[in-house]
């Protein structure tokens, strides 16, 4: 027993763990795996100057010069149209507070705008020192929260995965996307990223070193540093003959727990889990139906493109009915009618296909993919009006409006708005009136004047997004202020698209 405890204690030192205590999680995101141990505090030098231990002292590496990680981005100013001095004189805390205030549910065009801000190359906020990557991590975390794993991964790689916090996020992305072997190899290559026992055991097993994995688990059990649920799961992960996990609740797994449960033949459905877990169902090992359901969930959040979703729909003919298969069948019929240029069939199929996609929260995905093509068809009656609305929700909204026949009533204002001349038509209803007021407003809304006066452009964009969300919830003055602010920021096209989405909200569900 003494020998086992000695081995365990030595192994704990190697792995960077403190005997008798579990490693504390490093992130506020509650579903991230506890895969990297928190860095140990620097030891206090003994007053006598005599070393109290033969162990090497902790080493802290601090770059003396170099760009701040907060400046990293995937989109340069030449692509975004945003200034490099995006945050102006704002501090990191100012930006973090503003970013946290942006709602999770946004109109599609505003979701795109937020993603652009999150991925933009920009000077770091005032006072952001080298090593202070709080804004970078907040941007990555917002991308993770909306399921944009590919973009979060690319942003981390651009910034450099050279801190435990950054690697921890990359490790979980790899677990969900099925590239954990590469992540484990990177972990082994960076001994300064002290892995926690569950991550160490998982990676040893994935690398085929089952004996070392078993020894590490035994040592962790001897030290008593595993939670009961981790202990049970790791034991079953290493030995398929072990059964029973009474009292253990796997309903809210981390990505590491999720992958181990999958490995022991007890996969957790991704539907109730955070949207990032949907990526696990896009892997080729999954069936067609789970892949479609995951793709729909990610497309709904603006993470997956229509090409990817409809490519899955059209992979083969559905062999069942109900639920997702109704949408697949409808898209198949519509695609065939479009390919054959059968206008009559399109007119017959379109209302049902639109209703099914709308009811599933996929109206904007459908409009982005088919809107311009459908709006250009010589349809008549209600099918023609529906095609017009779908076209106005597409990126080609302006060309759709320019090619459309003159309209009356609400549609007349929609066409004028899409053309950029909302003053040329009568606005009907409080929402349309607020939209018109926003486009005709002179000067800046009082609520954002100080921000723009100080050139805090990034914060002003985030404020406009939040205001538009308030408007979508019924605060019409917020709608007018948001549009006026977006126009003042030079984001005229975003303002038009968001206004069209708001006005057609009833049609899109």
Image (spheres, rainbow, N blue to C red):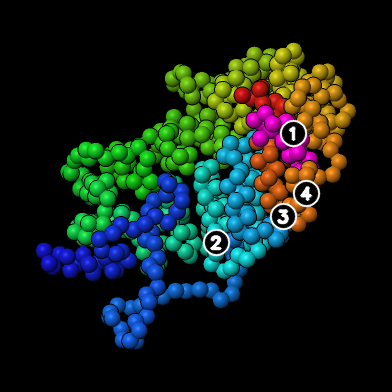
**Mark 4 and mark 2: Cα distance apart in space:** 29 Å
Q: Residue at image x 72%, y 36%? A: 478
Which residue is located at x 38 percent, y 59 percent? 36
Q: Earlier in the sequence, mark 2 or mark 1?
A: 2
Q: Residues within 10 Å of mark 3 (few under 14, many from 20)?
A: many
Q: Mark 2 and mark 3 in contact? Answer it, CB < 8 Å.
A: no
* The one of 437 and 59 positioned closer to us in this rendering: 437
Q: CA distance from mark 4 to mark 3?
A: 10 Å
Using the numbered discs, state the Cα–Cα distance from disc 4 to disc 1 in whole angstroms.
16 Å
User: Which of the marked residues, 4 or 1, is nearer the chain's N terminus?
Assistant: 4
Secondary structure found at label 1: helix
Please, what secondary structure does the residue beneath circle 3 have? loop
Q: CA distance from mark 1 to mark 3?
A: 22 Å
Secondary element at image label 4: helix
* Residue located beneath label 3 in the image: 456
Left or right of 100, for residue 221 = left
Q: Which mark is residue 133?
A: 2
Which numbered marker is on residue 477?
1
- Picture residue at 22% right of the left edge, 57% below the top: 224
Determine contact: label 1, label 3, CB under 8 Å. Answer: no
SS category of the residue bearing label 2: loop
Q: Earlier in the sequence, mark 4 or mark 2?
A: 2
Q: Position of residue 248 (x, y in %)?
A: 26, 40
* Stretch of the chain drawn in magenta: 470-487
Instruction: Please give the residue where the numbered disc 4 appears in the rendered image.
Output: 449
Which mark sits nearer the N-terminus, 4 or 3?
A: 4
For the stretch drawn in magenta, the main secondary structure is helix
- Label 2 close to label 1 by CB (< 8 Å): no
Image spot of residue 56 (x, y percent): 33, 78
């Amino acid at each position: 027993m003494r020998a086992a405890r000695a081995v365990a204690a030595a192994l704990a030192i190697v792995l960077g763990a403190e005997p008798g205590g579990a490693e504390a999680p490093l992130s506020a995101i509650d579903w991230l795996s506890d895969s990297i141990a928190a860095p140990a505090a620097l030891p206090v030098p003994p007053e006598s100057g005599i070393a109290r231990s033969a162990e090497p002292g902790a080493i802290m590496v601090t770059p003396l010069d170099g760009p701040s990680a907060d400046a990293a981005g995937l989109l340069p100013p030449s692509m975004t149209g945003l200034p490099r001095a995006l945050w102006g004189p704002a501090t990191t805390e100012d930006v973090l507070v503003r970013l946290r205030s942006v709602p999770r549910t946004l109109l599609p065009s505003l979701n795109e705008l937020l993603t652009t801000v999150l991925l933009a190359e920009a000077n770091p906020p005032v006072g952001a020192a080298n090593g202070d990557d709080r804004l970078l991590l907040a941007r990555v975390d917002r991308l993770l929260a909306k399921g944009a794993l590919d973009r979060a991964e690319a942003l981390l790689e651009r910034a450099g995965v050279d801190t435990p916090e950054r690697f921890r996020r990359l490790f979980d992305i790899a677990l969900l996307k099925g590239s954990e072997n590469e992540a484990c190899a990177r972990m082994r290559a960076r001994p300064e990223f002290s892995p926690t026992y569950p991550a160490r055991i998982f990676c040893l097993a994935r690398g085929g070193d089952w004996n070392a994995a078993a020894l590490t688990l035994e040592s962790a059990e001897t030290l008593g540093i595993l939670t009961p649920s981790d202990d049970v799961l790791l034991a079953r992960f290493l030995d398929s003959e072990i059964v029973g996990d009474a009292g253990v609740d796997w309903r809210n797994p981390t990505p590491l727990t999720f992958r181990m449960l999958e490995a022991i033949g007890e996969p957790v459905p991704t539907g109730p889990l955070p949207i990032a877990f949907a990526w696990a169902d896009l892997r080729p090992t999954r069936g067609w139906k789970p892949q479609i359901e995951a793709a729909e969930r990610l497309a709904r959040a603006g993470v997956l493109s229509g090409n990817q979703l409809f490519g899955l729909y059209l992979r083969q003919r559905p062999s069942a009915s109900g639920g997702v298969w109704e949408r697949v069948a409808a898209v198949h019929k519509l695609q065939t009618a479009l390919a054959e240029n059968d206008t009559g069939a399109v007119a017959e199929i379109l209302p049902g296909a639109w209703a099914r996609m709308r009811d599933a929260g996929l109206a904007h995905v459908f409009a982005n993919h088919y809107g311009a093509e459908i709006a250009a068809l010589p349809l008549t009656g209600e099918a023609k009006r529906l095609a017009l609305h779908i076209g106005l929700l597409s990126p080609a909204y302006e060309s759709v409006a320019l090619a459309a026949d003159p309209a009356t009533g609400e549609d007349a204002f929609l066409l004028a708005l899409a053309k950029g001349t909302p003053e040329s038509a009568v606005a009907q209803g409080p929402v349309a009136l607020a939209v018109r007021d926003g486009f005709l407003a002179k000067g800046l809304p009082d609520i954002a004047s100080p921000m723009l006066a100080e050139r805090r452009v990034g914060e002003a964009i985030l404020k406009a997004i939040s205001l538009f969300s308030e408007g979508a919830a019924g605060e019409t003055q917020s709608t007018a202020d948001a549009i006026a602010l977006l126009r003042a920021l030079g984001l005229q096209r975003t303002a038009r698209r968001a206004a069209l989405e708001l006005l057609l909200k009833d049609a899109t569900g």
